[in-house]
Image (cartoon, grey):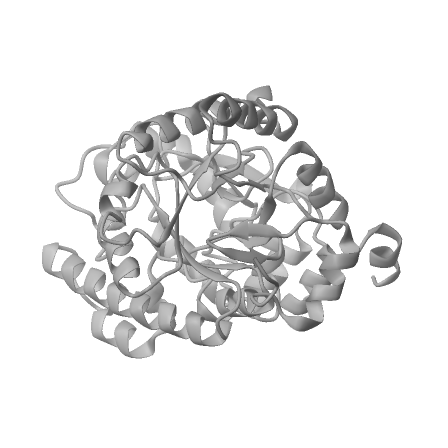
Amino acid sequence: MSSAHIDAQLIPALQSSGLKPLQLGGRELLPIVQGGMGVGVSAQKLAGTVAALGGVGTLSSVDLRRHHPDLMARTEGLNAGEEAKRQINQANLEALDREIAGARERSQGRGLVALNVMRAVSEYASSVKRALEAGIDAVVVGAGLPLDLPDLAQDHPKALLIPILSDSRGVQLIVKKWERKKRLPDAIVIEHPRLAGGHLGAARISDLNDQRFNFDRVIPECLEFFRKAGIEREIPLIAAGGIRTHDDIQRLQGLGAAAVQLGTPFAVTQEGDASDEFKRVLAEARDEDMVEFTSVAGLPARAVGTPWLKAYLKIEHKLQAVAHVKSRCTKAFDCLAQCGLRDGFKDWGQFCIDNQLAAALRGDIKKGLFFRGAGSLPFGDQIKSVRELMERLLTTGPAAQAAT
């Protein structure tokens, strides 16, 4: 292992931080992973910059065509139906190729470039396969159990496979199932559903505060399982959810985590791929502004209580009361494998998540769904660069406070 994959200016900061580097994929990296955020929030600019500094930069696979005017022009105005879905999916795969190539170029061979794919999306398998063919370093999968990920990646043994889970039971299940396929996770993200943003790894909103998700419980439980299974040095754990400071990282490494993953603090950086208004909404939001609700994907979710979300939640019960199975998606982009709106699930969300997330990407506060994690951000409501964020996270308490 060497520090060749970390930006030279950040090596002294890491060495003086008291933090351990992340050993992953034969590389020594900063112990900082940027979470994948869709629609379009983490694309090549953000992911490539994070990787160039020596972290793990993560693209989100969902609807990346929105960053490519020619692909949007090709797919706008399509009527709902199978042909529209085919054309949009093809455009998104083209966009995925472009975004991976762009992120890899920006990374300059440092760090790692990953792709986050939601297990809940209908094009999960094709996105994974296309990314692997395009040379992605790692595939990260959440919003469902990726039991079939080793099968999808069987022709790409060097690609890193990283599931996102929330408790030790899920970790044990994945490890045991994958072992039968002669593959172990290269790392596992442990995401705390009470603290993270976006879709959350709990069955119901009422489960978000369950003690089994607490880092000081789930990390030791996982490490003990690894020890008993004889694989304790083979699978790094990456803690995710509400991590904001150097002290947070140090505490989690003390529990046995190898690294941490942050989403919202990266989403609001200068290099974040969303609009300035998107960043402002997230940066200015406080914990009391957060709203928890059930997504159209059937998962608990956390977002800023913007005008659209508040208005939707006021009438959600009425929409759910009349929910019914549609013959097809009423929108051109039929994105989810199971959808509350299309499939008539009365306890699930009743809106088009792609439309609302795309509006947020543009900064449309009247129509947008703005996912955000809990906790105040490292720079408050200021918009700083990825490098400044990395430096802040690697700086111990007093110096970090003085830099504010």
Residue 379 visible somewhere in the drawing: no
Q: How many marks?
A: 0
Seen at 48% across and 36% down, the residue is 200
- 347 sits to left or right of 342: right
* Residue 183 sits in quarter: top left
Instruction: Give the answer, above or below, for where 363 lies relative to 105.
Output: above
* Residue 281 sits in quarter: bottom right
Instruction: Give the answer, above or below, for where 80 lies relative to 76.
Output: above
Q: At which x and y percent is residue 263?
A: 56, 52
Query: 207 or 362, which lies in front?
Result: 207
Q: At which x and y percent is residue 59?
A: 43, 60
- 123 sits to left or right of 21: left
Seen at 25% across and 64% down, the residue is 93
Quarter holding the N terminus? Answer: bottom right
Q: At which x and y percent is residue 37?
A: 47, 54
- 194 sits to left or right of 322: right
Query: 300 or 26, which lies in front?
Result: 26
Instruction: Looking at this view, name the residue that lies furthest to the bottom.
Output: 70
Seen at 49% across and 57% down, the residue is 366
Quarter holding the C terminus? Answer: bottom right
* Residue 80 sits in quarter: bottom left
Residue 59 visible somewhere in the drawing: yes
Query: 236 or 294, which lies in front?
Result: 236
Q: At which x and y percent is residue 241?
A: 59, 41
- 198 sits to left or right of 241: left
